[in-house]
């Protein structure tokens, strides 16, 4: 018995696939899909023009209160208006309804999930990511190993959702299998976003993003 | 009207298998012998559960424990409903295997003939009296459900095959072997009526499973639970209804029973869905003691017409997926751990929002004039007067009518680490407070 060799276009396709695998180390399916962040300066520098759909993005913020959530709200609002739910897994502070609604997020889509342990949080994150009715999942794991990030990445891919992990700034010193890793620094008129890793994109850039509260006169 | 069609299920190892605590291991003879006192009760309980399960295919279900155990379903009316009797039978046999019961099934126009054919080897399905007659003729007399001495008498009279006996005039049989034998043969052929005590469906569901040996760990509960839930699904289908919740009670030796309630956000009757939820719940459950028996109970039922699973389509499907997620989260994390958010018309920030059950929508109050932060502290926290104020003040005065009156000036302040803070100065009592963060 002999194995039939691929011929013609089939063969060319396989070769192309192989070349792609060699270039990136992994199939690049997920990074092609993206949901616009709502910040043109950021979208211009992210592959696909926005947050990676079906993947995990890690946000490492220097401090709490510099706009790390506001950076996401336009994308979350867009997903919610498309009828998908936004799951918040054990947020360290209370998402404030009036503030979120003011930025265009319909509150009906908010699912706040409380947990008692890191293990429960990771489990709930995975479940929510796998659910196609959920558009984005926000998690704040105090500690997470690569294997768990990979698991969540697979879950996000299965559910076609955006997984956001807020991680402490120290996490920037380690590597991670997440598709996108951003460091967030406070800046006078907004937020400085440093692209530490961007699968299929450019890393090393620092961008200014205007997320500061509109100062009422 | 078409002729009757009876399905008979013979369950030769019902008592042993009802005690089985895993799919592969039926209770051994020794442990069953130890429990002779209640093995009849175990068999009876298992049969009651199976009768409820069988009700999904037939509204006439009957059973008999001696010389069996045997379970009958009258199927003449249901045949067309379930795609012909071959498909129906395949379906029933598949579920019996899933339940973990050894079984032999046969279909015949009379209950007695169906019972006989469960022991006849090949070709167990006949649907007309004529077919039945020719099927019975070559079979040995020993298959007849008759007392030993009658069978011996027939044998000594030179009879070997059922056909030979059926060839004799009924009156002669009655004279020689007694009227009961004659009636049995007429019922076998379907020429005399054979009334069966119809099983009555109870108004509430309660099924109990007793362990052979006490069980200490929750994973050991899963096999019997799978069976209980599958039987429960049969009952729900039979009643054409669904449930929003059911309870699982765990009986312990010398300790009061404990239990959990499994709740759904929409009426359901799918055994696989139930099992998923039960599994999640068991993972976080700490048993107070070893379990000696399990009981599944449901008291309230809803009409099946509101079943989510009956709908298909984009939005409905998405809703259904969300229900599944919410049910799973609640089963594992506990009730009240999944919530939604809404706004309330109140100027005081701490009262301008509240938690609601997930997925509810509420009226939206008028948009606030000034920008609000995305996150709030659970309680305003007392702080030193901030060094750098970026904007403000915004005066908020409210609450004199409910005793929670406030007079505050709100500002956006900047902390040393660059964080933007939502702070206020309490004008009544003095002092500065941090209430929110511009995350």
Image: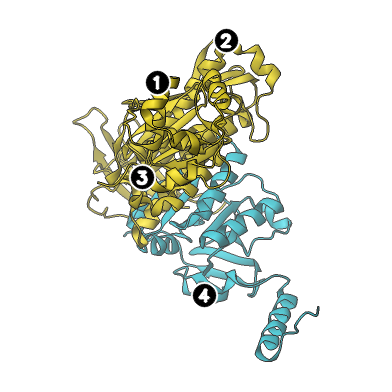
Chain colours: A cyan, B yellow
Residue B150 spot, x, y in % from top left: 51, 21
Residue pointed to by mark 3: B341
Q: Which mark is residue B175?
A: 1
Kindly state the secondary structure of the residue where label 2 is placed.
Answer: helix
Check disc 4: other Cα within 10 Å, few if <14, some if 14-19, many if 20+: many
Kindly state the secondary structure of the residue where label 1 is placed.
Answer: helix
In the image, residue B24 above or below residue A169: above
Residue pictured at 47% horizontal, 39% vertical? B274
3 and 1 marks on the same chain: yes
Kindly state the secondary structure of the residue where label 4 is placed.
Answer: helix
In the image, residue A168 above or below residue A76: above
- Whether pointer 3 and pointer 1 mark residues with C-beta atoms closer than 8 Å, the reply is no
Measure the alpha-carbon separation of dots 2 and 3.
Answer: 57 Å
Quarter location, residue B304? top left
In the image, residue A213 above or below residue B124: below
Q: Of the residues tagged 2 and 3, which is closer to the observer?
A: 2
Q: Which mark is residue A49?
A: 4
Residue pictured at 42% horizontal, 42% vertical? B108
In this rendered view, identify the residue nearer to me: A179 or B379. A179
Measure the alpha-carbon separation of dots 2 and 1.
Answer: 41 Å
Which chain does tag 4 point to? A
Residue B57 spot, x, y in % from top left: 38, 42
Residue B272 spot, x, y in % from top left: 49, 43
2 and 1 marks on the same chain: yes
Tell me if residue B189 can be seen: yes
Query: Which callout, 2 or 3, points at the residue further toward the start of the chain?
Result: 2
């Amino acid at each position: 018995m002999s194995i039939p060799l691929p011929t013609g276009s089939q063969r060319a396709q396989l070769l192309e696939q192989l070349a792609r695998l060699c270039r990136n180390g992994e199939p690049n399916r997920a990074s092609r899909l993206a949901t616009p962040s709502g910040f043109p300066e950021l979208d211009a520098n992210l592959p696909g023009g926005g947050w990676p759909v079906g993947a995990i993005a890690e946000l490492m913020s220097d401090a709490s209160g510099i706009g790390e959530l506001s950076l996401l709200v336009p994308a979350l609002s867009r997903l919610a208006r498309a009828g998908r739910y936004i799951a918040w897994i054990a947020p360290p502070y209370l998402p404030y309804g009036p503030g979120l609604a003011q930025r265009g997020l319909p509150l009906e889509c908010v699912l706040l999930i409380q947990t008692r342990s890191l293990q429960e949080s990771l489990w709930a994150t995975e479940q929510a990511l796998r659910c196609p009715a959920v558009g984005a999942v926000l998690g704040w794991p105090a500690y997470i190993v690569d294997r768990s990030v990979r698991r969540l990445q697979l879950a996000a891919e299965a559910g076609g959702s955006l997984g956001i992990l807020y991680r402490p700034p120290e996490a920037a010193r380690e590597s991670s299998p997440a598709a996108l890793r951003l460091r967030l620094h406070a800046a006078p008129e907004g937020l400085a976003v440093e692209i530490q890793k961007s699968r299929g994109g450019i890393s090393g850039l620092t961008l200014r993003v205007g997320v500061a509260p509109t100062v009422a006169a | 009207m078409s002729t009757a069609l009876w399905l008979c299920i013979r369950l030769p190892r019902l008592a042993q298998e009802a005690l089985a605590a895993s799919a592969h291991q039926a209770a051994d003879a020794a442990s069953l012998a130890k429990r002779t006192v209640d093995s009849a009760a175990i068999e009876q309980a298992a049969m009651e559960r199976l009768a409820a399960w069988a009700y999904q295919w037939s509204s006439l279900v009957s059973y008999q424990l001696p010389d069996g155990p045997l379970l009958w379903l009258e199927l003449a009316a249901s045949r067309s409903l379930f795609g012909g009797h071959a498909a129906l039978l395949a379906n029933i046999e598949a579920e019996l295997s899933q339940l973990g019961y050894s079984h032999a099934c046969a279909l015949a126009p009379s209950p007695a003939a169906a019972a006989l054919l469960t022991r006849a080897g090949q070709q167990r399905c006949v649907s007309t009296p004529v077919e039945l007659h020719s099927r019975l003729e070559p079979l040995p007399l020993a298959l007849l459900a008759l007392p030993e001495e009658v069978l011996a008498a027939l044998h000594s009279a030179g009879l070997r095959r059922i056909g030979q006996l059926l060839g004799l005039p009924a009156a002669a049989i009655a004279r020689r072997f007694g009227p009961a034998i004659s009636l049995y043969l007429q019922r076998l052929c379907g020429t005399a009526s054979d009334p069966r005590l119809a099983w009555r469906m109870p108004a509430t569901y309660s099924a109990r499973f007793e362990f052979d040996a006490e069980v200490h760990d929750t994973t050991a509960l899963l096999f019997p639970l799978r069976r209980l839930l599958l039987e429960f699904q049969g009952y729900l289908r039979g009643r054409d209804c669904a449930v929003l919740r059911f309870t699982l009670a765990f009986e312990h030796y010398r300790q009061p029973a404990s239990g959990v309630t499994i709740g759904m956000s929409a009426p359901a009757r799918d055994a696989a869905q139930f099992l998923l939820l039960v599994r999640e719940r068991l993972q976080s459950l700490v048993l107070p003691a070893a379990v000696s028996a399990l009981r599944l109970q449901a008291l309230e039922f809803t009409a099946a017409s509101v079943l989510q699973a009956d709908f298909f389509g984009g939005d409905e499907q998405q809703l259904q997926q969300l229900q599944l997620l919410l049910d799973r989260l609640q089963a594992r994390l506990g009730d009240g751990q999944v919530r939604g958010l809404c706004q309330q018309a109140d100027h005081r920030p701490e009262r301008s929002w509240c938690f609601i059950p997930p997925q509810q929508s509420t009226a939206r109050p008028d948009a606030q004039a000034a920008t609000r932060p995305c996150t709030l502290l659970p309680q305003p926290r007392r702080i030193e007067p901030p060094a750098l104020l970026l904007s403000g003040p915004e005066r908020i005065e409210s609450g004199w009518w409910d005793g929670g009156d406030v007079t505050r000036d709100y500002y956006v302040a900047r902390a040393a680490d660059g964080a933007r803070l939502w702070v206020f100065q309490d004008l009544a009592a003095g002092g500065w407070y941090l209430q929110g963060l511009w995350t």
